Protein backbone atom coordinates (compact mmCIF):
# COMPACT_ATOMS: atom_id res chain seq x y z
CA UNK A 1 0.00 0.00 0.00
CA UNK A 2 1.12 3.56 -0.66
CA UNK A 3 2.22 5.65 2.30
CA UNK A 4 2.80 9.36 2.89
CA UNK A 5 5.25 10.59 5.51
CA UNK A 6 4.99 13.99 7.20
CA UNK A 7 6.98 15.48 10.07
CA UNK A 8 5.00 15.46 13.30
CA UNK A 9 5.65 19.13 13.94
CA UNK A 10 7.05 22.25 12.33
CA UNK A 11 7.72 25.56 14.04
CA UNK A 12 8.04 28.95 12.39
CA UNK A 13 8.61 32.44 13.68
CA UNK A 14 5.84 34.95 13.13
CA UNK A 15 6.24 36.52 9.67
CA UNK A 16 8.71 33.91 8.45
CA UNK A 17 8.26 31.07 5.95
CA UNK A 18 7.10 27.60 6.97
CA UNK A 19 7.70 24.54 4.84
CA UNK A 20 5.84 21.30 5.48
CA UNK A 21 6.99 18.24 3.58
CA UNK A 22 5.14 15.13 2.44
CA UNK A 23 7.23 12.19 1.38
CA UNK A 24 6.17 9.28 -0.79
CA UNK A 25 7.62 6.94 -3.37
CA UNK A 26 7.76 8.89 -6.64
CA UNK A 27 5.15 11.29 -5.29
CA UNK A 28 6.14 13.69 -8.06
CA UNK A 29 4.15 11.52 -10.46
CA UNK A 30 0.96 12.01 -8.44
CA UNK A 31 -1.33 14.95 -7.73
CA UNK A 32 -0.91 16.15 -4.15
CA UNK A 33 -3.53 18.01 -2.17
CA UNK A 34 -3.18 19.78 1.18
CA UNK A 35 -5.68 20.40 3.96
CA UNK A 36 -5.59 22.69 6.98
CA UNK A 37 -7.43 21.61 10.12
CA UNK A 38 -7.84 23.81 13.16
CA UNK A 39 -8.92 22.33 16.54
CA UNK A 40 -12.54 21.28 16.60
CA UNK A 41 -13.07 22.08 12.93
CA UNK A 42 -13.38 20.14 9.71
CA UNK A 43 -10.42 20.12 7.31
CA UNK A 44 -10.19 22.86 4.71
CA UNK A 45 -8.60 22.37 1.29
CA UNK A 46 -5.73 24.85 0.89
CA UNK A 47 -3.85 23.44 -2.14
CA UNK A 48 -5.03 21.03 -4.84
CA UNK A 49 -3.18 19.38 -7.72
CA UNK A 50 0.23 20.23 -6.29
CA UNK A 51 0.09 24.01 -6.50
CA UNK A 52 -3.43 25.35 -7.05
CA UNK A 53 -5.22 27.47 -4.47
CA UNK A 54 -9.01 27.27 -4.03
CA UNK A 55 -10.79 30.60 -4.00
CA UNK A 56 -10.46 32.33 -0.66
CA UNK A 57 -7.09 30.81 0.22
CA UNK A 58 -4.40 33.49 0.62
CA UNK A 59 -1.54 33.69 -1.87
CA UNK A 60 0.78 33.06 1.07
CA UNK A 61 -0.05 29.37 0.65
CA UNK A 62 1.78 27.60 -2.16
CA UNK A 63 2.73 24.06 -3.08
CA UNK A 64 5.31 22.16 -5.06
CA UNK A 65 5.91 18.52 -5.90
CA UNK A 66 8.91 16.73 -7.34
CA UNK A 67 10.70 13.43 -6.97
CA UNK A 68 9.84 11.86 -3.65
CA UNK A 69 8.75 15.01 -1.82
CA UNK A 70 5.87 17.45 -1.99
CA UNK A 71 6.05 20.69 -0.04
CA UNK A 72 3.47 23.10 1.33
CA UNK A 73 4.97 26.55 1.81
CA UNK A 74 3.35 29.19 3.99
CA UNK A 75 4.92 32.63 3.56
CA UNK A 76 4.70 35.42 6.13
CA UNK A 77 3.27 33.02 8.69
CA UNK A 78 0.52 34.36 10.91
CA UNK A 79 -0.81 33.22 14.26
CA UNK A 80 -3.99 32.14 12.47
CA UNK A 81 -2.01 29.63 10.41
CA UNK A 82 -1.44 27.46 13.48
CA UNK A 83 -3.15 24.18 12.63
CA UNK A 84 -2.63 20.60 11.58
CA UNK A 85 -1.81 20.13 7.92
CA UNK A 86 -2.43 16.95 5.94
CA UNK A 87 -1.25 15.95 2.48
CA UNK A 88 -3.31 13.59 0.34
CA UNK A 89 -2.93 11.67 -2.90
CA UNK A 90 -4.82 9.11 -4.91
CA UNK A 91 -3.11 5.79 -5.44
CA UNK A 92 -4.52 3.30 -7.92
CA UNK A 93 -4.04 0.39 -5.51
CA UNK A 94 -4.70 2.02 -2.14
CA UNK A 95 -7.26 4.67 -3.04
CA UNK A 96 -7.27 7.96 -1.15
CA UNK A 97 -4.19 8.24 1.05
CA UNK A 98 -3.64 10.86 3.76
CA UNK A 99 -0.36 11.69 5.39
CA UNK A 100 -0.06 11.45 9.16
CA UNK A 101 -0.41 15.21 9.60
CA UNK A 102 1.94 17.98 10.72
CA UNK A 103 1.26 20.35 13.57
CA UNK A 104 2.37 23.87 12.67
CA UNK A 105 3.33 26.15 15.55
CA UNK A 106 3.83 29.87 14.96
CA UNK A 107 6.23 31.29 17.53
CA UNK B 1 -23.22 27.07 -2.19
CA UNK B 2 -22.21 23.49 -1.43
CA UNK B 3 -22.98 22.16 2.03
CA UNK B 4 -22.86 18.68 3.54
CA UNK B 5 -24.08 17.40 6.89
CA UNK B 6 -23.56 14.05 8.56
CA UNK B 7 -26.20 12.40 10.72
CA UNK B 8 -26.46 9.17 12.64
CA UNK B 9 -26.07 7.69 16.10
CA UNK B 10 -23.58 9.20 18.50
CA UNK B 11 -23.20 5.94 20.44
CA UNK B 12 -23.10 2.37 19.17
CA UNK B 13 -22.31 -0.86 20.95
CA UNK B 14 -19.48 -3.20 19.97
CA UNK B 15 -20.45 -5.63 17.17
CA UNK B 16 -23.32 -3.40 16.05
CA UNK B 17 -23.63 -1.91 12.57
CA UNK B 18 -23.18 1.83 12.13
CA UNK B 19 -25.28 3.67 9.58
CA UNK B 20 -24.38 7.25 8.73
CA UNK B 21 -26.18 9.57 6.33
CA UNK B 22 -24.66 12.49 4.47
CA UNK B 23 -27.25 15.01 3.29
CA UNK B 24 -25.95 17.58 0.87
CA UNK B 25 -27.04 20.59 -1.15
CA UNK B 26 -25.57 22.80 -3.84
CA UNK B 27 -24.64 19.97 -6.21
CA UNK B 28 -26.09 16.83 -7.72
CA UNK B 29 -24.65 13.34 -7.59
CA UNK B 30 -25.97 12.79 -11.06
CA UNK B 31 -23.52 15.35 -12.47
CA UNK B 32 -20.57 13.88 -14.33
CA UNK B 33 -17.35 13.79 -12.33
CA UNK B 34 -18.91 14.40 -8.93
CA UNK B 35 -18.38 12.19 -5.91
CA UNK B 36 -18.95 12.03 -2.16
CA UNK B 37 -16.48 10.48 0.22
CA UNK B 38 -16.34 9.46 3.85
CA UNK B 39 -13.32 10.17 6.03
CA UNK B 40 -12.89 9.55 9.74
CA UNK B 41 -10.58 10.86 12.45
CA UNK B 42 -10.10 9.16 15.83
CA UNK B 43 -9.62 11.62 18.68
CA UNK B 44 -6.17 13.18 18.45
CA UNK B 45 -5.23 11.14 15.39
CA UNK B 46 -4.90 11.57 11.64
CA UNK B 47 -7.49 11.54 8.90
CA UNK B 48 -8.38 8.14 7.45
CA UNK B 49 -10.25 7.68 4.19
CA UNK B 50 -13.09 5.15 4.20
CA UNK B 51 -15.07 5.18 0.95
CA UNK B 52 -16.06 7.13 -2.16
CA UNK B 53 -19.08 6.96 -4.43
CA UNK B 54 -19.30 8.71 -7.77
CA UNK B 55 -22.05 10.03 -9.98
CA UNK B 56 -21.99 6.88 -12.12
CA UNK B 57 -22.28 4.62 -9.03
CA UNK B 58 -18.60 3.71 -9.17
CA UNK B 59 -17.61 2.84 -5.59
CA UNK B 60 -14.18 2.73 -3.98
CA UNK B 61 -13.26 1.47 -0.53
CA UNK B 62 -10.28 1.59 1.77
CA UNK B 63 -8.59 -1.79 1.30
CA UNK B 64 -8.15 -2.25 5.05
CA UNK B 65 -11.86 -1.73 5.79
CA UNK B 66 -13.47 -2.89 2.57
CA UNK B 67 -15.05 -6.01 4.07
CA UNK B 68 -16.96 -3.92 6.62
CA UNK B 69 -18.09 -0.98 4.49
CA UNK B 70 -20.96 -0.30 2.12
CA UNK B 71 -21.59 3.05 0.46
CA UNK B 72 -24.78 3.90 -1.42
CA UNK B 73 -26.41 6.99 -2.85
CA UNK B 74 -29.96 8.27 -3.24
CA UNK B 75 -29.74 10.94 -5.90
CA UNK B 76 -33.36 12.01 -5.51
CA UNK B 77 -32.84 12.73 -1.81
CA UNK B 78 -29.32 14.18 -2.18
CA UNK B 79 -28.02 11.64 0.31
CA UNK B 80 -25.13 9.23 0.62
CA UNK B 81 -25.26 6.45 3.20
CA UNK B 82 -22.30 4.63 4.72
CA UNK B 83 -22.69 1.44 6.71
CA UNK B 84 -19.90 -0.10 8.76
CA UNK B 85 -20.41 -3.52 10.30
CA UNK B 86 -18.99 -5.09 13.43
CA UNK B 87 -18.12 -1.86 15.19
CA UNK B 88 -15.30 -1.87 17.74
CA UNK B 89 -14.10 0.72 20.27
CA UNK B 90 -11.17 1.51 17.95
CA UNK B 91 -13.75 2.80 15.46
CA UNK B 92 -14.56 5.68 17.80
CA UNK B 93 -13.97 8.76 15.67
CA UNK B 94 -15.40 11.84 14.07
CA UNK B 95 -16.85 10.82 10.74
CA UNK B 96 -16.86 13.35 7.90
CA UNK B 97 -18.46 13.32 4.50
CA UNK B 98 -17.02 15.48 1.75
CA UNK B 99 -17.61 16.53 -1.86
CA UNK B 100 -15.02 15.10 -4.19
CA UNK B 101 -13.83 15.02 -7.78
CA UNK B 102 -13.56 11.83 -9.80
CA UNK B 103 -10.70 12.46 -12.23
CA UNK B 104 -8.25 13.64 -9.56
CA UNK B 105 -9.83 12.74 -6.23
CA UNK B 106 -9.64 15.40 -3.57
CA UNK B 107 -12.20 16.90 -1.20
CA UNK B 108 -13.10 20.55 -1.63
CA UNK B 109 -16.12 20.79 0.67
CA UNK B 110 -16.52 19.01 3.99
CA UNK B 111 -19.33 18.46 6.44
CA UNK B 112 -18.92 19.48 10.07
CA UNK B 113 -18.40 15.88 11.14
CA UNK B 114 -20.20 13.70 13.63
CA UNK B 115 -18.58 12.00 16.61
CA UNK B 116 -19.40 8.33 16.95
CA UNK B 117 -18.44 6.56 20.15
CA UNK B 118 -18.31 2.79 20.32
CA UNK B 119 -18.86 1.54 23.83
CA UNK B 120 -20.91 -0.99 25.70
Image (tube, rainbow, N blue to C red):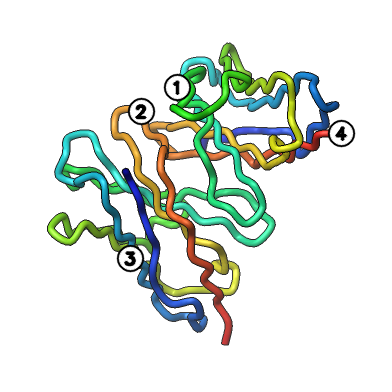
| SS at mark 3 in the image | strand
Q: Rounded to the nearest whole Å, what is the CA distance between mark 2 and mark 3?
A: 24 Å
| SS at mark 1 in the image | loop
N-terminal of the two: label 4 or label 1?
1
| SS at mark 4 in the image | loop
Residue linked to disc 4: A107
Q: Which is more foreground, mark 4 or mark 1?
A: 4
Q: Residue at x 55, y 36 (%)?
A: A35
Q: Are marks 1 and 2 on the same chain?
A: no
Q: Rounded to the nearest whole Å, what is the CA distance between mark 4 and mark 2?
A: 35 Å
Residue linked to disc 2: B104
Q: Rounded to the nearest whole Å, what is the CA distance between mark 3 and mark 1?
A: 29 Å
The residue most toward the top is A66
Query: Are discs 1 and 2 less than 8 Å apart at CB?
Result: yes
Q: Are marks 4 and 1 on the same chain?
A: yes
| SS at mark 2 in the image | loop
- Determine which of the numbered discs, if any, sits on residue A49 in the image: 1
Residue linked to disc 3: B21
Q: Position of residue A3 (x, y in %)?
A: 58, 35
Q: Residue at x 64, y 25 (%)?
A: A23
For the residue carrying disc 4, how many other residues have a C-alpha within 10 Å: few (<14), some (14-19), or many (20+)?
A: few
Q: Chain of mark 4?
A: A
Q: Quadrant of residue B2?
A: top left
Amino acid sequence: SYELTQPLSVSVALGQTARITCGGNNIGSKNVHWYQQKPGQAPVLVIYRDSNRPSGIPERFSGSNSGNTATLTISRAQAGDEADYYCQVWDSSTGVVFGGGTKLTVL
Amino acid sequence: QITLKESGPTLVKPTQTLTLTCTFSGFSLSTSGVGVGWIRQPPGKALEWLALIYWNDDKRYSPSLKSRLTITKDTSKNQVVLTMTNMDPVDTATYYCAHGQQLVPFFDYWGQGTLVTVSS
